[in-house]
Image (cartoon, rainbow, N blue to C red):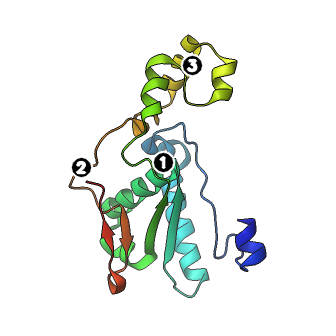
Amino acid sequence: TDFLTKELGYVRELNVDAATYDWRLPPKRTEQRDQYLTKMRARIEKMYLDNADLPIILLCHSMGSKMGHYFLNYAKANYGQEWLDKYIHAYMPIGAPHCGVSFAVKAVLMGSGLTPVIDLMMGDDEGAVLYRSFGSAAWLMPRTIPSNVIPSIICRQEGEIAMTLD
């Protein structure tokens, strides 16, 4: 965000913000333990109001893209399509593992391969226990996206772009 704030004039917590989360947990648990999704909704609504009712762009990176996608489905189920249309201008995943990643299989089955640092610190048995303890591990397993999920890229209807990962 330094480039955005120093070079482009964005202001932290006004028109650019980060929504960090505990990536080891499955998304449902982040809501149960931390009220993460509820807090994200409140942050989005505050940014909307603080910026003259301008809908936000939900820009997500890597596994955060999966959390963003989960949030959009959560918001649609709990607050309705009208809430999404009002507060979200676009969802932009960058480097998203929506279809999973092959190294997750090796990490969970064999206990190595997630990161070289952890591989050096732990044996395969310890690594397998560690990786299997992450509730989010299932998110990274290779799979296909069901056809009934909302699009993976959402833009307002004025310039409608919809893309799914079939």
> Amino acid type of disc 3?
Gly
Quadrant assignment, res 69: bottom left
Residue pictured at 42% horizontal, 44% vertical:
28
Residue that carries the numbered disc 3 in the rendered image: 127
Kindly state the secondary structure of the residue where label 3 is placed.
helix
Residue pictured at 52% horizontal, 59% vertical:
60
How far across and how far down the image is residue 149, in percent? 26, 56
Front-lying residue, 155 or 40:
155
Front: mark 1 or 2: 2
Kindly state the secondary structure of the residue where label 1 is placed.
helix
> Amino acid type of disc 2?
Pro
Residue that carries the numbered disc 2 in the rendered image: 146
- First in sequence: mark 3 vs mark 2: 3
Q: Residues within 10 Å of mark 3 (few under 14, many from 20)?
A: many
How far across and how far down the image is residue 84, in percent? 38, 71
Q: Are marks 3 and 2 in contact (CB under 8 Å)?
A: no
- Left-right relation of 28 to 24: left
> Amino acid type of disc 1?
Glu
Note whether 27 is above or below 18 in the view shown.
above
Front-lying residue, 166 or 130:
166
Front: mark 1 or 3: 3
Distance in Å between CA atoms under marks 3 and 2: 31 Å
Note whether 36 is above or below 46 in the view shown.
above
Residue that carries the numbered disc 1 in the rendered image: 31
